[in-house]
Amino acid sequence: MKEAREGEERLAFDPADNDGPRVAFIGRIHTPWKPGDAPGNVAGARKRVAKEGGAFRIELAEGYQPGIKDLTVGQHIIVLYWMDQARRDLIVQTPRHADAPRGVFSLRSPNRPNPIAMSTVEIVSLDVEAGVIGIDALDCFDGTPVVDLKPWIATIDAPVA
């Protein structure tokens, strides 16, 4: 277990021990990122892709292919993914970009009781039969499990001005 930074607080229990709802991973994300190399967010991933290139795809597990039949190249989707290598014991964190400790629910850090991440990405290629979605970029390690995919819909997902 990593040492806590100054000001960080750990939970008194491990959320992974909770016998709550079960999640079925529907596939895996493939990226060029490895531990110690991943950008901090999808915007950072896009910047690195612009400089370095890189291929990103979601490969669905067997049986889930029909679920993407109405997606299209150029469409944006919301990817929910399980940051399986993240810490789950921090409730207050000291991020490098902040000047003081912050509550986990005010951060987009993968280190949280349920390490669910969310990014909106663009579909750049699509093979429905194979269950492979090419996407513009993502910020997670290669092999990260996918929890769900949802279409990004401007009238629902865009913030109200």
Image: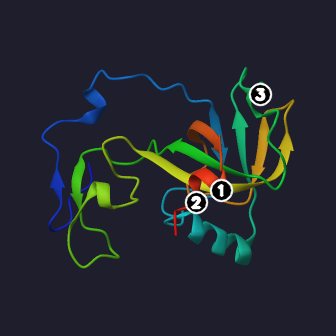
Total labels drawn:
3
Q: Nearer the viewer, residue 33 or 12?
A: 12
Label 1 vs label 3: CA separation?
A: 25 Å
Left or right: 55 in relation to 98: right
Q: Is residue 69 visible?
A: yes
Image location (x, y in percent) of residue 34: 56, 56
Q: Which picture quadrant has residue 6?
A: bottom left
Q: Secondary structure at mark 2?
A: loop
**To which residue does mark 3 refer?**
65
User: Within 10 angstroms of label 1, few (less than 14), some, or many (20 or more) residues?
Assistant: few
Q: Which picture quadrant has residue 115?
A: top left
Tell me which amino acid carries mark 2: Ala
Q: Which picture quadrant has residue 130?
A: top right
Disc 3 vs disc 2: which is toward the camera?
A: 2
Tell me which amino acid carries mark 1: Ala
User: Mark 2 and mark 1 in contact (Cβ < 8 Å)?
Assistant: yes
Q: Secondary structure at mark 3?
A: helix
Image location (x, y in percent) of residue 132: 79, 39
Q: Residue at x 78, y 50 (%)?
A: 134
Image location (x, y in percent) of residue 14: 23, 36
**To which residue does mark 1 refer?**
154
**To which residue does mark 2 refer?**
158
Of labels 3 and 2, earlier in sequence is 3
Q: Nearer the viewer, residue 159 or 134?
A: 159
Q: Nearer the viewer, residue 102 or 17?
A: 102
Instruction: Note whether 90 is above or below 40 in the view shown.
Output: above
Tell me which amino acid carries mark 3: Gln
Label 3 vs label 2: CA separation?
A: 28 Å
